[in-house]
């Protein structure tokens, strides 16, 4: 039976679709969390930031080599019922392996540095000292992919041995993952002699105790194992891997890369006792010419999935998605003096232009590129049920239910139906990640410091602080004379005296609570032109300016004692309005708040109405005489299902009208609940669509986003003045309109 | 407030990281007030206890309470430090605060996390920390001249305090500063082994764990674990709690409430400890 044969009742269809959406959302959220926690794990081990990029099993391995800032991992762990590791352990092993490359200097090679395990066979390096050592490394192997692969394999052996020593808790999972990888290895009996020898090395690197090999290869494998075994010594360095790879390549290149020996027998690695030093410097001198043109690993090769794939980093070239062959070609051209002078780590993009001949888009435009026309992220992994215009309204837009303590449902104003739709939006609270540094905040303070001090002075002028004496308290600075006399009288009358004997001199708490909501829609990723007035100020995105503006006002509020909360909002549809809590109104200000603020990134859509309703609800829970809600946005409200259903009937503008009308309605609701709402937009066209529906005192249009920090401070000050003694008098303040 | 009675046999364990013992001793000889800067749990308080023992432990004329420690908080007032009148059956009586007591008796007065205290509190320190070395007590209408052996020591954690709670230059410039950081791994291993009475292997693993997690601290993701926290975990292990469980209870929960960060920390713990 299939769904198309027997249709369930309409309500059930809704539930099925809802469940699908929720499951997809939960899965996407779980994947996000997994990526985040693995990135933090990597950062703990290396101190470096990385982006995790999952790849599926069919991806081209050449295009998934790690870079300085990107770590590629299989999308799924290769699990099998016979394997004794979990998915989490697989990823932990894989991340540790990559982290240990950083820690043990795989990419900090110095070809002239001594190493303690091998007799030096590296030829003296006479190339241009400006060329990075890793790039010169390729020259030792005739710029062949085989050489780089063998160097990478030697590094894998060294790194895995060091990992097991350094992380005893990971030794078991590492062995299990390696054991699992051995199940995936090709039969040596169908490989060429050279490939069979490489396969023997790979199996040795994975901790196998034996290999099936033709007897003709035994002396070669014996020597290879003797060389590789040294790399497990705690004293081995990245230069040891160079020496090992040179010796191994010398042995491999002597073996034919075609034909095969069909008769094999078991070789136990423990029984092998080869000589790691049976080569001469002369052998190495001729190695580049003998290896030039040697093919890399052929299609027989099965990549070990927990290990990274050698790419540009292994030959000292900057980031990029070039194949190793391209990179080696580039390295060869440089070595011959035909290319540009060696790049620093940041110069990789220029090299890519030389080879690809096509311009790469600037990185900062990436968030927008990744957005699909429907505004949803390309990798969201979720499928929303398509609205069908012929279905009854309530079938595809049922009331929503909150299922956790961090979920809230709110109504929405439907201007075309002219009614409030109850429980129409679901707001989910998230704790904003704190993977930035609070120093960003201090830099903003340094850049705009005068705004903060000016605002503090102005607020203190309109609401001067004085020391208020609270009398008859149980603790305090001085005895309260009246209370003391009363107590003395009580004692002499044998009555029990009160212990409220003191006068407490404290600064009165301010009576203002403010909630700032920052728009995190995808469009806030837009980069602004350089500031002509202050050329020293770095180029910023709209989000950066929004964040700077809020952090400045928040800093001033903290200094004068106004309580405040900071929230970022985005979402994808009415059942997923995401509100990231940077600082709750009742949360104490700690450095982590600035870290969270600095970690906010452009996300998705802008369903402002639901955000205003939730923060109004939150402010209502706060005991303060004056409550202010400040929404900072960069454009008109938009969501994937924010009035689109009326387009067929009322035209393309219906979606726009619906969203703006709901926003205006939410502002009015907020006002009616004794909250002073302010909508501040940097959309120069904001006046056109806000003026007809909003109270003119509740929205402010800032034509040039660069003015936002100063304008927000001015607006806040104006609303504070207007609300002095009149909790809901924000409407008395003059609106701000800046061209 | 806590007061410390020190006997010669009770040497507080402290392993010098650099020249802080010599610096503090020299400052004491010259009666220069001392400011200790450093992250949470890196050993500032223990250092002061150790120095009090060094300075007073052998002296027969040492005050009964040679070290007076005050943990400052945002409700701490000058009256809490200087003293206040109390009501008794016979009338009112004056009770010295911890600072006044130390000034009178010639003890070390250690104000821990001083910037947490209310701003008016630091002002009363000014006359004590320059050549006058005296404490005016407004409510008594008197001034107390500091005992010759008295020294004021304050501490704060510049990474933790927000900019608005920084010390004012007029206060800061009255002190000689000693900068503290977490001890190097081998030194921290010795400290953990001694304090928790833990074997060297597991103490070394805990020190290594601290080293890894402090990278997240440097990145601003968490406040890196102090040595004190690692010692607590070691003490749980000594009592038979399995290392992973001890870390989870004593460290993971203390460092972060965010599930992603907790999972990352648990991964580091599980990589280092087999069980």
Image (cartoon, rainbow, N blue to C red):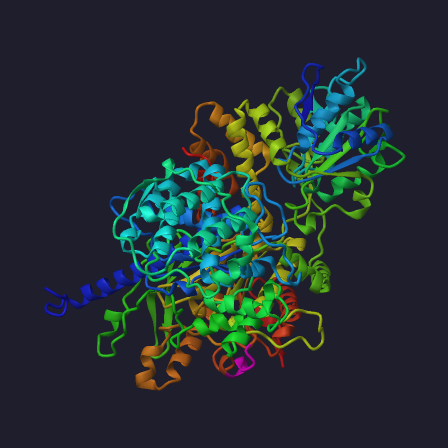
Vertical relation: A230 (above or below) A148? above
Residue A696 visible, this orientation: yes
Looking at the rendering, which quadrant does residue A464 occupy? bottom right
Looking at the rendering, which quadrant does residue B203 occupy? top right
Vertical relation: A295 (above or below) B273? below
How many numbered marks does the figure carry?
A: 0
In percent of width and height, residue B197 lies at 55, 22
- Position of the C terminus of chain B, as image quadrant, is top left
On screen, residue A324 versus residue A642, left or right, reads right
Residue A481 visible, this orientation: no
On screen, residue A515 versus residue A646, left or right, reads right
On screen, residue A459 versus residue A629, left or right, reads right
- Position of the N terminus of chain B, as image quadrant, is top right
Q: For this rendering, which residue is in front, A586 or B193?
A: B193
Which region is colored magenta? A683-688
Q: For this rendering, which residue is in front, A168 or A139?
A: A139
In percent of width and height, residue B18 lies at 73, 34
Q: Residue furthest bottom?
A: A651
Q: For this rendering, which residue is in front, A317 or A435?
A: A317
In percent of width and height, residue A499 lies at 62, 29
At 65% from the left edge and 49% from the top edge, which residue is drawn? B162
In percent of width and height, residue B247 lies at 47, 35
Task: Check if residue A510 falls in the magenta segment.
Answer: no
Vertical relation: A666 (above or below) A138? below
């Amino acid at each position: 039976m299939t769904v198309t044969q027997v249709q369930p009742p309409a309500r059930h269809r809704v539930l099925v679709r809802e469940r699908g959406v929720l499951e997809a959302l939960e899965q996407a959220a779980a994947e996000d969390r997994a990526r985040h926690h693995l990135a933090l794990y990597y950062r703990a081990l290396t101190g470096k930031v990385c982006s995790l990029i999952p790849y599926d099993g069919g991806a081209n391995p050449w295009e998934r080599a790690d870079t300085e800032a990107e770590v590629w991992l299989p999308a799924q762990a290769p699990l099998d019922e016979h394997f004794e590791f979990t998915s989490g352990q697989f990823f932990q092993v894989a991340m540790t392996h990559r982290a240990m490359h950083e820690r043990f200097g795989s990419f900090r090679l110095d070809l002239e540095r001594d190493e303690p395990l091998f007799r030096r066979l590296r030829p003296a390096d006479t190339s241009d000292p400006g060329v990075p050592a890793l790039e010169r490394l390729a020259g030792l192997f005739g710029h062949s992919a085989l050489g780089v692969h063998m160097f990478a394999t030697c590094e894998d052996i060294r790194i895995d041995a060091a990992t097991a020593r350094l992380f005893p808790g990971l030794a078991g999972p590492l062995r299990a993952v390696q054991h699992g990888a051995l199940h995936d290895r090709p039969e040596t009996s169908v490989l060429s002699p050279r490939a069979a020898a490489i396969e023997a090395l790979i199996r040795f690197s994975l901790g196998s105790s034996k290999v099936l090999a033709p007897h003709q290869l035994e002396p070669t494998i014996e020597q290879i194992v003797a060389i590789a075994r040294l790399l497990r010594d705690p004293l081995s360095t990245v230069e040891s891997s160079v020496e090992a790879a040179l010796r191994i390549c010398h042995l491999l290149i002597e073996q034919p890369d075609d034909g095969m020996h069909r008769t094999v027998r078991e070789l136990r690695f423990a029984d092998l006792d080869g000589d790691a030093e049976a080569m001469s410097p002369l052998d190495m001198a001729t190695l580049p010419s003998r290896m030039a043109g040697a093919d890399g690993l052929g299609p027989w090769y099965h990549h070990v999935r927990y290990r990274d794939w050698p790419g540009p980093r292994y030959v000292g070239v900057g980031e990029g998605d070039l194949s190793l062959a391209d990179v080696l070609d580039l390295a060869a051209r440089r070595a011959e003096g035909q290319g540009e002078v060696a790049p620093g780590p940041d110069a990789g993009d220029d090299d890519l232009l030389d080879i690809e001949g096509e311009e790469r888009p600037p990185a900062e435009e990436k968030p927008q590129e990744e957005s699909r026309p429907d505004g949803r992220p390309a990798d969201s992994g979720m499928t929303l049920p398509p609205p069908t215009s012929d279905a009854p309204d309530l079938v595809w837009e049922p009331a929503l239910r909150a299922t956790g303590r961090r979920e809230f449902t709110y109504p929405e104003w439907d201007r075309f139906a002219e009614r409030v739709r109850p429980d129409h939006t679901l707001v989910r609270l998230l704790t904003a990640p704190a993977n930035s540094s609070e120093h960003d905040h201090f830099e903003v303070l340094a850049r705009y410091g005068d705004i903060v001090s000016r605002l503090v002075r102005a607020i203190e002028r309109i609401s001067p602080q004085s020391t208020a004496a609270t009398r008859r308290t149980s603790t305090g600075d001085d005895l309260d004379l009246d209370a003391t006399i009363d107590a003395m009288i009580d004692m002499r009358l044998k009555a029990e005296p009160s212990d409220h004997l003191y006068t407490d001199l404290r600064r009165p708490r301010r009576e203002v609570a403010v909630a700032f909501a920052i728009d995190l829609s995808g469009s806030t990723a837009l980069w602004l032109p350089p500031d002509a007035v202050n050329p020293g100020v770095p180029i910023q995105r709209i989000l950066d300016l929004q964040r700077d503006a809020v952090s400045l006002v928040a800093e001033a509020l903290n200094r004068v004692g106004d309580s405040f909360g900071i929230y970022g909002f985005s979402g994808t549809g009415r059942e997923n309005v995401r509100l990231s809590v940077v600082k709750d109104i009742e949360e104490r200000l700690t450095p982590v708040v600035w870290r969270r603020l600095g970690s906010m990134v452009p996300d998705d859509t802008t369903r402002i109405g639901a955000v205003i309703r939730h923060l109004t609800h939150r402010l209502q829970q706060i005991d303060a005489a004056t409550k202010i809600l400040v929404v900072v946005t960069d454009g008109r409200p938009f969501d994937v299902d924010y009035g689109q259903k009326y387009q067929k009937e009322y035209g393309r503008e219906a979606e726009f009208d619906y969203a703006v009308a709901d926003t205006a309605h939410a502002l009015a609701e907020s006002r009616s609940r004794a909250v002073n709402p302010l909508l501040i937009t940097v959309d120069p066209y904001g006046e056109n669509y806000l003026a007809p529906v909003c109270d003119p005192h509740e929205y402010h249009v800032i034509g040039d986003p660069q003015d936002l920090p100063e304008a927000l401070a001015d607006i806040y000050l104006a609303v504070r003045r207007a609300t002095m003694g009149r909790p809901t008098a924000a409407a008395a303040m003059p609106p701000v309109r800046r061209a | 407030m806590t007061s410390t009675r020190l006997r010669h046999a009770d040497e507080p364990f402290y392993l010098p990281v650099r020249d802080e013992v010599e610096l503090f001793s020299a400052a004491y000889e010259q009666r220069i007030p001392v400011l200790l800067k450093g992250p949470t749990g890196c050993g500032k308080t223990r250092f002061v206890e150790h120095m009090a023992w060094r300075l007073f432990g052998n002296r027969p004329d040492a005050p009964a309470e040679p070290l007076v420690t005050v943990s400052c908080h945002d409700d701490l007032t000058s009256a809490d430090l200087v003293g206040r009148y109390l009501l008794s059956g016979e009338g009112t009586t004056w009770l010295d605060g911890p600072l006044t007591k130390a000034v009178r008796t010639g003890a070390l007065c250690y104000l821990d996390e001083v910037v947490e205290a209310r701003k008016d509190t630091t002002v009363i320190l000014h006359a004590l920390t320059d050549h006058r070395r005296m404490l005016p007590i407004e409510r008594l209408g008197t001034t107390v001249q500091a005992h010759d052996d008295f020294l004021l020591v304050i501490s704060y954690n510049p990474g933790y305090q927000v900019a608005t709670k920084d010390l004012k230059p007029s206060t800061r410039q009255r002190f000689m500063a000693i900068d503290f950081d977490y001890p190097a791994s081998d030194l921290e291993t010795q400290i953990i082994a001694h304090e928790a009475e833990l074997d060297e292997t597991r103490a070394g693993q805990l020190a290594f764990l601290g080293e890894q997690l402090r990278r997240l601290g440097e990145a601003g993701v968490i406040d890196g674990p102090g040595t004190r926290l690692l010692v607590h975990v070691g003490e749980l292990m000594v009592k038979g709690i399995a290392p992973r469980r001890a870390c989870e209870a004593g460290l993971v929960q203390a460092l972060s409430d965010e599930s992603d960060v907790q999972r990352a920390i648990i991964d580091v713990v599980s990589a280092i400890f087999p069980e």
